[in-house]
Image (tube, helix red, strand yellow):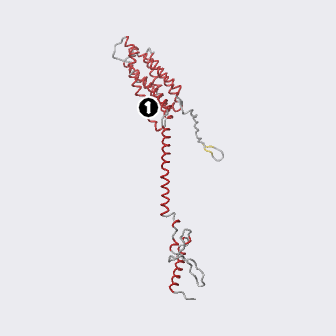
Amino acid sequence: AQPVPQSRCMRRTVALASALLLSAAFPARAFSPGLLPLRGMSGSPATSPRGVGGARLGSVPGRSQLLPARGARTGGKYGSLQMQQQVDEKAEASKPLLAADGEKAANKEEEAQALTPAVWGVLALLLAANVHNQWTRALVYYIVSFKVEATEITRHLYMNIDLGFDETQYSLLASFGFTTFFTLCSLIAGRAADRTDRASIVSIAAVAWSLATLGQGVATTFDWVLGGRALTGAAQAFLTPAAFGLIADRVPNSRLSTANAFYSSGVYLGGALASLSILLDNSLGWRDTSLLCGGIGLGIAGVAGLFLRDTRGPLPPAQPTVKPTAALAMPGGKELG
């Protein structure tokens, strides 16, 4: 056998030593399935060095053995860019669908938040009750006069001349005769609206203050009118708590302020209508003006009784409160306390 040149032996020896060192340092990555095909240190296909007997001692791992193949580097920079590009493409493709779904959801939400004609009908009925409430409350201010002489005509036009009461009695009629009972009944009106049928409260209250106004139209004494004012104050205290509860049950939260403002405008509309009662008084007289006002109130109460309903339904009965016992059991069955 011809001797192997010394330079060739040195190269094989160095390659074998390098292979052993790299295999010991990177045992897992040297045999990873994602590695490139085995190549030698010189770039030629890898060969296994032969031993003394010509047997192969193992392949020589080059630098390229330790690098993953290009297709296997999905978790690296190039794979991340490809995944991000795919995500962006899907996002762009789904934008029209998302926009359409968002528009449909917005339309459904807007429809759900809109006030239906039925709700507007309830609001209009409650507004009419509130307007009449304020009208009858302030009516007495416009059917009296202390600056005219007592004649047959002025008795027909002004209550104070017909019934013969003075300014001191009128101040009681216009203030404490009404506000005392209104304030006292306001303390229980909210509780009543929480525990009973609120639609019935509105109807019954409207009937009560309308009857008081009718009674004012046929009164023959000051005490009669004062009793009617007291009944008016007591009945009108129950309207607003029940009305606000009925509105809150029918109107979504996003429209609740609008609905409450619509109902509350009756305070000023009723006050304005009461001031126009001077025109009715000049045409009909104070008695017929009171009767007309009371009759309109009965009509509103009748419509409320026919069409207004409390959507809350029957309330559950109140549960009795169970008081815990203070007795303590002792060994042997005895109790302390």
Mark 1 = which residue?
262
Q: Which residue occupies the foreground of this view, 99 or 273?
A: 99
**In the image, residue 125 lies at what x, y percent?**
48, 27
Quadrant, the C terminus = top right
Quadrant, the N terminus = bottom right
**Horizontal relation, residue 233 to residue 50: left or right:** left
Asked if residue 114 shows in the view, the reply is yes
Residue lying at the far right in this picture: please name it: 332
Q: Amino acid at mark 1?
A: Phe
Classify mark 1: helix, strand or loop: helix
Q: Which residue occupies the foreground of this view, 96 or 63?
A: 96
Asked if residue 189 shows in the view, the reply is no
Q: Which residue occupies the foreground of this view, 128 or 52?
A: 52
In the figure, residue 172 lies in which quadrant? top left
**In the image, residue 104 lies at what x, y percent?**
50, 43
**In the image, residue 330 lies at what x, y percent?**
63, 46
Q: Is residue 186 above or below residue 96?
A: above
